[in-house]
Amino acid sequence: MDSTPPSVHDKNTQTELTSLGAADWPPATLHSVDKALAVVELLMRRSEPLPARIIAQEAGINRTTTHRLLNALMHRGWIEKPPGTTSYRLSLKFLALAHVSTQIRSFLDEVRPAMEHLSRLSRETVHLGVLDGWEVLHIDKVESLERVGISSKIGSRAALHTTGLGKALLAASSDEVLEDYLAHATSPAATVRVTDPDAVRAEIALTRSRGYAVDNEEDSIGVRCLGVAILGAGGAPLFAISLTGPSPRFTMELVETYAPEVMAVARALSRRFGWAPEAEAAPVQPDGRQPRSRRRKTAQSSS
């Protein structure tokens, strides 16, 4: 019996299944859906495309079934092969799905109370930023409660290696993402170029070890920033949250004072967005090493 999930465009199958509750669906159909979702969730957790062999191994599905599921997902447009490769990754269709989802429930509404809490605690400006290309994009903010604050605009962009938000996002990403960024940032195409890649690597290592990022007047003279990434399922960074203030007032002592609370807030938000640290233990290879794509210590693991 073919256990491939039926197409929703198959009218006979659609009529039959929509008249049943999920518990009444044929076991083979439920089993196939479960396996297909396991493949999707695996690809969500990994930043790089994966070959079918690795997908089958890590999802715990035999290769024949894996290939059938991959073909079905590709046919429906949910996954794709990057040009010139035989590996698989999620397609842009997932972005469209996320866009539709935000029309129903905005994730900013979920994060806003946490931002307002940090604003009341620190009285400094609170920013929210996402990785967009090789820049950090500011998508929300809560203004400082002080008379003198930081001038910033929602929609503005900044370099990753000079900002608290950007460093937090890089630190929560894999080593491969960091190296890809450095390759870009040292090229003539970069808006803000990296002149010392080793210094950036050392800064990201420090950020990972202490659990938070600091922009110590690197992006703008007179401005200091504390940033922490919020993670999603699989530990990939979704966005980052930061406190930003004038450096004479927002001293390094205050950065260290507020860092534990910012990390606690980020950890709580990460759990709400699907991060499960207990599921993050990477399988160990025969030589005792972790897979390269998982060699990272996220900002959350230190909070």
Image (spheres, grey):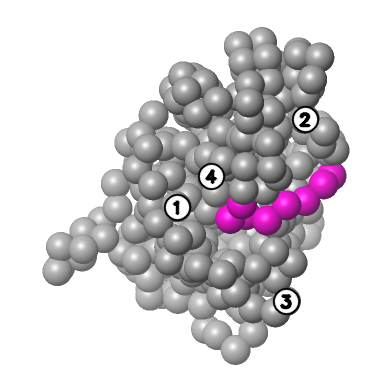
Q: CA distance from mark 3 to mark 4?
A: 23 Å
Q: CA distance from mark 1 to mark 3?
A: 22 Å
**What type is the residue that disc 2 sits on?**
Ile
Q: CA distance from mark 1 to mark 4?
A: 8 Å
Q: Which residue is mark 4?
A: 168
Which residue appears at 57% of the width and 41% of the height?
Answer: 216
**What type is the residue that disc 4 sits on?**
Ala
Name which of mark 4 and mark 2 comes first in the sequence. 2
Give the vertical position of 18 relative to 77 (above or below).
above
Name which of mark 2 and mark 3 comes first in the sequence. 2
- Find out whether the residues at labels 1 and 3 contact each other: C-beta distance under 8 Å: no
Q: CA distance from mark 2 to mark 3?
A: 29 Å
Name which of mark 1 and mark 4 comes first in the sequence. 4
Q: Which residue is mark 3?
A: 189
**What type is the residue that disc 1 sits on?**
Ile
Can residue 302 be seen in the rendering of this structure? yes
Label 2: how many Cα within 10 Å (few below 14, some 14–19, many 20+): some
Q: Specify the segment rendered in magenta.
A: 155-162
Q: Which residue is mark 1?
A: 204
Q: Farthest residue to the left: give it.
A: 287
Near-viewer residue (76 or 23): 76
Near-viewer residue (136 or 196): 196
Which residue appears at 58% of the width and 42% of the height?
Answer: 215
